[in-house]
Image: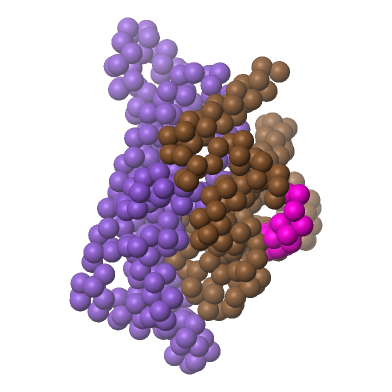
Chain colours: A purple, B brown
Amino acid sequence: MSWAGWLRLIVVGGAVLLLEVLCRAGVIAKTVLPAPSVMAGDLYRLLASGAASADIGETLGNVAMAVIASILLGFVAGVAIHAMPRVRRALDPFLATYYAVPFFVFYPVLIVIFGLGAAPIVVIGTLFGVVAMLINTLNGLDRIPRVLLKTARVHGMDPVRTALMVKLPSAAPFLFTGAKLAIAYCFIGVIAAEFIMSSSGIGYSIAYAFNNFDNARMYALMLFIIVLVTVLNAVLFTWERRIMQRRRR
Amino acid sequence: MRRKTDTLLVIVALVALWQVLHWIVGSVALTSPADTLARAVELLGSATFWPHVAETGVALLYSLLLAVLGGLTIGIALGINRLAGEVAEPILVSLYSLPKITLYPVILLAFGLGLSAKVAFGTIHGIIPVIIFTMNAVRTIPPVMLRSARVMRLSPPQLVSTIILPAALPELVSGLRVGFSLTLLGVLIGEMFASQRGLGYLVMNAIGGHDVRTMMAVVLILATTAVLISAGLLHIDRRMHRRAS
């Protein structure tokens, strides 16, 4: 691991340790935040007892569906919009301001349209993720070096082969960035939707525990999400860096 | 000119889509555009609506101020010190993509109900993109400028005010734009769960009372305002980038 990597580990470890000490010393009240070690213990017991498995499974399933939907829809829409410059120019300001609209407020409308259950949650997650993928697809298609397209034409490649052998590989890093963002946004959308007014899933479970003063369960689940998302991000971040570096060469 | 017509066409298409959806699902789920607009005008004309707007506005203003000033300071510091930036970046990126709504109970327990919790929630949403954008902006400043600053023996405050801020300004506006959207989102979520005032509360209250008309009207007002402010920032953003390039 690099020097910065070790330092990062020390910084994060130090922060957790500091939190632990502050909690143990009573500077941070137990009712506000339990010590990290206590949280971890609660999480272990919760996972081992299987009491949260159904909620976790459901949330992960919803996120997976939302991720697949946003990546596919975002990619297809991105390719289609890129092919129509005039539509693209018209849509541009809307895409750029898309994330200014607070989507959670549409959740009740979606419940009436799609019924209670997983569908409205997946739709919210998809709405959150799809535009990140779309924007990055457009970006990726924009950055294909002109010279490569000319070379393809000189070699007499047909459109399908050009797309598969030239366009896709050179747009790939941006597509990856889009997918990475889509995953992060889908997590945010799905968990927030569950938090607001669902009747199952991790988000709901946290809100429920909060309302019932079940701090042990609440913090255990929070820790679970934080660790899960952080690990996922770290993996994607490292992978993305490697792809970008390969392209730069 | 053609560009404006195109934008207008997109708006017409969006309204048409809304109308069609309304026909499919009925008024119980989704009020029609005309009906929603009527309710929105009614709300804008009523005296009870404006205190909620003011409440949300104040919370948003405080959060934005904290997010931008804090984000700038931290971002510049991390941008100047290459190692610190490299150490911090992945941490910041994972904080950015964390579903911060799960932290809501902690914020509530720490700050109590009311304005401070909303502001805190808005700030934690907005500050991270501002930090990331600022940091990247400072990093891309040509090294020759920093070297000349050292030759001229500029003090750190002079360095920031005469070189770093002007050079990084276009990226800072981009950061501010993203920060604004997320801060607003944070403040609204805060109001939806733990407030008796503000637009978020109004939406939640309408949801609870199955008042789809009011809910849609508030959402329409919110979305329009957010998009307009964001579009304004986007306009400034593009002009700056064009001038910089």
Residue lying farthest to the left in this orientation: A49
Expressed as whole percent of the image width and height from the top left, the position of residue B8 reads 64, 25
Residue A97 visible here? yes
Q: Which residue lies at the image location 68% right of the left edge and 23% below the top edge? A: B4
Q: Return the residue nearer the eye: B242 or A121.
A: A121
Residue B163 visible here? no
Res B115 → quadrant = bottom right
Query: Is B15 situated above or below B44?
Result: above
Expressed as whole percent of the image width and height from the top left, the position of residue A135 reads 48, 35
Q: Of helix, strand and loop, which mostly describes the magenta segment?
A: helix
Residue lying farthest to the front in this orientation: B27
Report the number of discs.
0
Q: Which residue lies at the image location 60% right of the left edge and 51% below the top edge? A: B214
Res A172 → quadrant = top left
Q: Quadrant of the C terminus of chain B?
A: top right
Q: Is residue B50 magenta?
A: yes
* Residue A38 left/right relative to A84: left
Res B108 → quadrant = bottom right
* Residue B183 left/right relative to B99: right
Write the start and end of the magenta stretch as one range.
B44-60
Q: Which residue lies at the image location 61% right of the left edge and 47% below the top edge? A: B217
Q: Return the residue nearer the eye: B29 or B50.
A: B29
